[in-house]
Image (spheres, rainbow, N blue to C red):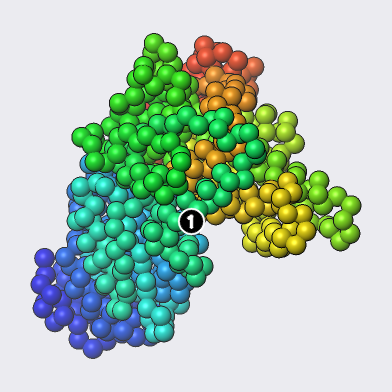
Amino acid sequence: MLSSGRWNSIWDGNFVDFEAYGGTSMAGIHDGGNCGMNKEQRSRLLECSSHFLPPKGVNLLYGTAGFRADATLLKSTVYRVGILAALRSLKTQSVIGLMITASHNKVSDNGVKIADPNGGMLSQHWEPFADSLANASDPLQLLQLIDDFVGKESISFDNDHPAEILVGRDTRPSGETLLEAAKQGISSIIGAISHDMGILTTPQLHWMVRSRNMGNKSTEHDYFQQLSHSFRCLVELIPYGNKASNSDKVVVDGANGVGGDKLEVLRDLCGGILIEVRNSSKGEGVLNEGVGADFVQKEKVVPSRFGPSDVGLRCASFDGDADRLVYFLVQADSQMIDLVDGDKMLTLFALYIKEQLNALNDNEIGKPGNSYHPRLGVVQTAYANGASTVYLKNLGLDVAFTPTGVKYLHEKASEYDIGVYFEANGHGTILFSDTVLSWLEARKIEFLSSNTGSESQKAVLRLLAASKLINQAVGDALSGLLLVEAILLHTGWSIQTWNDLYTDLPSRQLKVKVVDRTAVVTANAETSVVQPAGIQEAIDTETGTEDVIRVYAEATTQEEADSLANGVAKLVDQYLGSGSSP
């Protein structure tokens, strides 16, 4: 490794002495120019990046979950994402978030991802740059990439407001070391400021970034206060007679991670809600090992520390960084569960919002000048259970489909006045447009001077409280749990009543090893195959980040679903071929 003195010495006016770094030509790098980086900035980047050389033979890609890998391989990557975060802040002139987590992955893994100014994921436009940064072989190539990108994006380093990044991490032991690498990356951009927000859930950091850029209070305390206050508002608006009808406790599996710890704080602020937290990070369990929403949803068995004594109780499970939530019922005399997944949560939320909008619409009928009717829509992927889609459509709801991935669901949901989206794995949220929120605030003011205590007024207050309780930046197990609990209190339903809204079609999901998964081209939100030619016709006859293809099949019985999935898997293997199908 070259020392900081050596790095400084290779700079000479407007060029780099490429012989000082193994003969690498850097003719494209120059001092100043249109790209916005001066000599001091380039020197800082070279000196700092020399301490974070990438491991040999490792190639990482930035996806929906950011970068994830074994934690021992990530120091260089996290450092470079710190640089990216600072550049993104300069470009957008906004606060950016950097979260160190690997969500539901095993504890020895870790990862890093960016929260954009709206609290959402990093713009897809920047993902290729993230890939290039992470995989640059040496500091000079890294500098070249940054230099080119800064010029291409016209990023100015002479702004009145320096780059500002909120940094958080989950409870993984590797998080502290990687956090320091992120801070070093951020400080590699002159003037950039990092704020260590401590150990957080991923949704908390996204909420903070969104709130900060909206000019609102944005500390963890503010997060807890907003959620607890909104929950109490919804409880106060529960119809008379329902408040005591569903007062049993909910037992929550915290995946041995950060979510359980934060839920204990939130529970004490909400007052009156009966929550028992198991598998918090303070116990002896291992993060995501035999616990967590991902484990429960995929295995359909009880997590650690749950068993026969929990039969009849309302149970829920977070994933490791608390951005996923599923509910479940423990079956009698069994380790199996009845899963209440993201499809069921989407249905519950959509029903509740539809009820409030109907109450408002009934009040607005016949009023002169009333032409605004909020458009409610629900968004699913091809992995949603078909029974949920049929149920939602029979309610008269607008159901849209997108390709798999939260970024597609979120984007589509934002097209509605109120958009609800969830994946079956329990990741999802509700989006309220600025238009509908302004309309609700106007209705609230009108009701203050007239129909005090009317159902229409309560409907307005419920919708406004729900918009503040739900985390509109990303899926959030904490806010989602509180909204589910408030709605169950509102309806007086047990978890069994909720689960019985419809019966899931039996399904089976398989992975088929293929030579090249990019050979498969799909259409209609991944519900049909365009390429290779002939496979969709063969599948039609049958029905009457590895190179694998996921096969999801539904039928009227589990045996038929298994048979169909295996049949389609063999067809995929036949057309794409690696001889590994069941």
Q: Nearer the viewer, residue 136 or 335?
A: 335
Q: Residue at 10% across / 72% down in the picture? A: 3
Query: Can I make out residue 580 in this image?
Result: no
Vertical placement of 247 versus 174: above or below?
above
Q: Residue at 57% across / 36% down in the picture? A: 243
Q: Position of residue 508 (x, y in %)?
A: 49, 22
Q: Position of residue 537 (x, y in %)?
A: 63, 25
Q: Is residue 311 left or right of residue 535?
A: left
The residue that disc 1 covers is: 226
Q: Quadrant of residue 318?
A: top left
Query: Can I make out residue 110 in this image?
Result: yes
Q: Amino acid at mark 1?
A: Gln
Vertical placement of 541 versus 276: above or below?
above
Q: Is residue 418 left or right of residue 231?
A: right
Question: Tag 1, which secondary structure?
Answer: helix
Give the farthest residue toward the bottom. 13
Vertical placement of 253 versus 218: above or below?
above
Q: Is residue 392 left or right of residue 559?
A: right
Q: Residue at 50% across / 53% down in the picture? A: 229
Q: Residue at 23% across / 67% down in the picture? A: 184
